[in-house]
Image: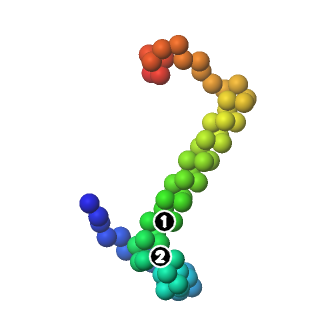
Amino acid sequence: MRAILNISLPKPMIEEIETEVTLGNFATKSEFFRHVLRFWKEEKLLRELKASRADFKAGRFKILNSLKDLR
């Protein structure tokens, strides 16, 4: 299911988006924003993984002996 989201952007940003669409890098402005959101989510996940690795290296982890330990 899709929904419509209206946003306000400065004119230079709008021009950049329109240029990307005109150059054929994206089929539509919506596709551009979907791409940006996917990239943002990937970066967010990467930051979370890096933080988890840092915690693990620092010894901040729990050894699980069974699924009950997840609680």
Front-most of residues 37 and 6: 37
As displayed, is residue 7 above or below residue 2?
below
Tell which circle, 2 or 1, labels the residue nearer the N-terminal end: 2
- Left or right: 63 as drawn, with respect to 33: right
Image x and y of residue 54, in percent: 70, 36
Q: Quick one: which residue is furthest to the right in this view?
A: 58
Q: Residues within 10 Å of mark 1 (few under 14, many from 20)?
A: few
Q: Residue furthest front?
A: 24
Mark in the foreground, 2 or 1: 2
Report if residue 17 is visible in the image. no
Residue denoted by label 1:
35
Q: Which residue is pictured at 54% across the width and 53% down the height?
A: 42
Q: Is residue 14 above or below residue 62?
A: below
Q: Please tell me whether mark 2 sits on a helix, a strand or a loop.
A: loop
Q: Is residue 65 above or below residue 20?
A: above
Q: Image quadrant for the C terminus?
A: top left
Q: Position of residue 38 (x, y in %)?
A: 49, 59
Residue type highlighted by circle 2: Phe
What residue sits 54% from the left and 58% below the top? Answer: 40
Instruction: For the residues labelled 2 and 1, say whether their Cβ atoms are less than 8 Å apart.
Output: yes
Q: Secondary structure at mark 1?
A: helix
Cα separation, mark 2 vs mark 1, equals 9 Å
* Residue bearing the label numbered 2: 26
Q: The N terminus is located in which quarter? A: bottom left
Q: Amino acid at mark 1?
A: His
Residue in the picture at 72% in, 30% down: 57
Q: Crowding at label 2, few (<14), some or many (≥20) Cα neighbours within 10 Å? A: some
In this view of the protein, can residue 36 be seen by the observer?
A: yes
Q: Is residue 40 above or below residue 63?
A: below
Q: Residue furthest left?
A: 1
Give 33 or 58, whichever is nearer the viewer: 33
